[in-house]
Image: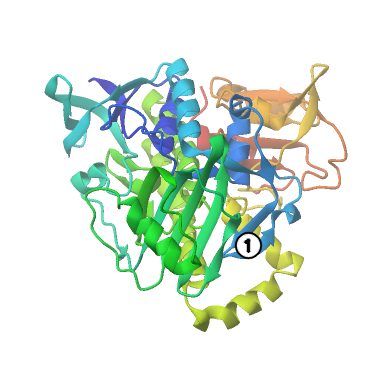
Amino acid sequence: MDAPVIVAGAGPAGLMIAAELRLAGVDVTVIERLPGRTGESRGLGFTARTMEVFDQRGLLRRFGDIETSNQGHFGGIPVDFGVLEGAHQAAKTVPQSATEAILEQWATELGVDIRRGHELLSLHDDGDGVRIDVRGPDGEQTLHAAWVVGCDGGRSTVRKAAGFDFPGTAATMEMYLADLRGVELEPRMIGETVPGGMVMVGPLPGGITRIIVCERGTPPQRRAEPPAFAEVADAWKRLTGIDISDAEPVWVSAFGDATRQVTEYRRGRVLLSGDSAHIHLPAGGQGMNTSIQDSVNLGWKLAAVVRGTAPEALLDTYHDERHPVGHRLLMNTQAQGLLFLSGEEMQPLRDVLAELIRYEEVSRHLAAMVSGLEVRYDVGSGSHPLLGLRMPRLRLTRDGRSTSSAELLHQGHGVLLDLADNPELRRRAAGWRDRIDIVTGTPEGAWSDGPLADTAAVLIRPDGHVAWAAPGSHHDLPMALERWFGPAR
């Protein structure tokens, strides 16, 4: 066997799951068709939940000073994300190319074997392992793995070769994206509806200006290469009256509003993450963020199965948890597309929604939806308000030193947080010490008025979601530990 796990695709989803697997001690090989990173950045910035995910792995410092903001939108209608108390602010204008470079550096440091210039040709799952045929710089070769994870994008070869169903709707329109130098345009950060379509303008680092152009009535095209900049400039002039033809195009691309999702995230020994599993209109920058979160959900589970500490059934929870998230992603991006890209017939609905958003409860609901903070997994019944949700950032004192719940997750282990210095609790969890960190700490600050009020202990999964809490969980601690981390040793 060449590797326990082979990941196809070295984008954010592929690099994230590869690093998560190595963090858990599993050898992994990443194959990538392209010979090097393109430097292109379809995605920009991080949602609040991805900021938390990177904080949980100690990655935020690698990005340096990140410009953040509480201002967002839903279908072009402004939303104040500041209503989400205790959450990170969203990161703005971090190019996807920078995110990929940092994730690749982290994965390489952890020992991930990244093979660029290797194209997957075919795949066969025989039930005991997966055989893949690859064309690389030295010709064709066959690789064998126990598991394969497809992170190879919306046109995924893995998805097609493994026979996943990918139902949905085809694109109905085409939009242009261009990064330009030598042009000064008025910022239109969340986009602006104009007669005939929608335009967006945002400044990027290095003196680059990004524009997005959607001209209604533009039919989608099957392109073998990016559109000529002249097409973009002509569309821009038709919609705005402004001539940008003298600008220097750094990168030009086209995309559509196709909306599809696989019916299952796992088939046998093949799993999908990110755009391989779901494609949609890139509204609100959710695509890359959801892809990263897919991989964080899958990584620790697949690692536990490979190491033999958890049964294979644990992998079924990946589909159970992430497929509904993907479904809601498609729902909200379709809704945003209708609001933002339709004509004047949609204006009454825009006006009504703008009025509703003035109510804090509505703003909180929409902000949580597009930021990923609403996600709650089924971890068992109980009354504790955090069950299944992500663990809010908690500062605590441990062994005389101040730390945080995010810092406790840097190693990718599960964490049993004992907030009441309970030796009996620690004794009952001792059989899982090889898979979880048992931490006794005292919360700092005004935590007693929040969702952790009167909480004596919390079990946090490696992905940062609360799996058990006391009091408030109907399952006892050993049952929760065995469900998520396998039998005691």
Q: Residue at x 23, y 58 (%)?
A: 222
The quarter holding residue 457 reads top right
Query: Residue 58, position in %: x, y?
Result: 61, 26
Query: Residue 330, position in %: x, y?
Result: 44, 61
* Pick the front one: 53 or 39: 39
In the rendered image, which residue does mark 1 sit on? 366
* Pick the front one: 328 or 388: 328
* Pick the front one: 226 or 428: 226
Q: Residue at x 59, y 24 (%)?
A: 62
Query: Residue 298, position in %: x, y?
Result: 44, 38
Question: In this figure, which colouring scheme has been used for the structure?
Answer: rainbow
Q: How many marks?
A: 1
Residue type indicated by callout 1: Leu
| Residue 166 horizontal side relative to residue 473, left or right | left
Placement of 321 over or under 488, stated as above or below: below
For numbered disc 1, what is the local secondary structure? helix
The quarter holding residue 59 reads top right
Label 1 Cα crowd, 10 Å radius (few <14 / some 14-19 / many 20+) = some
Query: Residue 16, position in %: x, y?
Result: 45, 32
Taking the image as drawn, is residue 190 in sight? yes
* Pick the front one: 241 or 463: 241
Which part of the image, by quadrant, shows the N terminus?
top left
Placement of 5 over or under 85, stated as above or below: above
The quarter holding residue 410 reads top right
Taking the image as drawn, is residue 464 in sight? no
Q: Residue at x 48, y 53 (%)?
A: 211
Placement of 299 over or under 219, stated as above or below: above
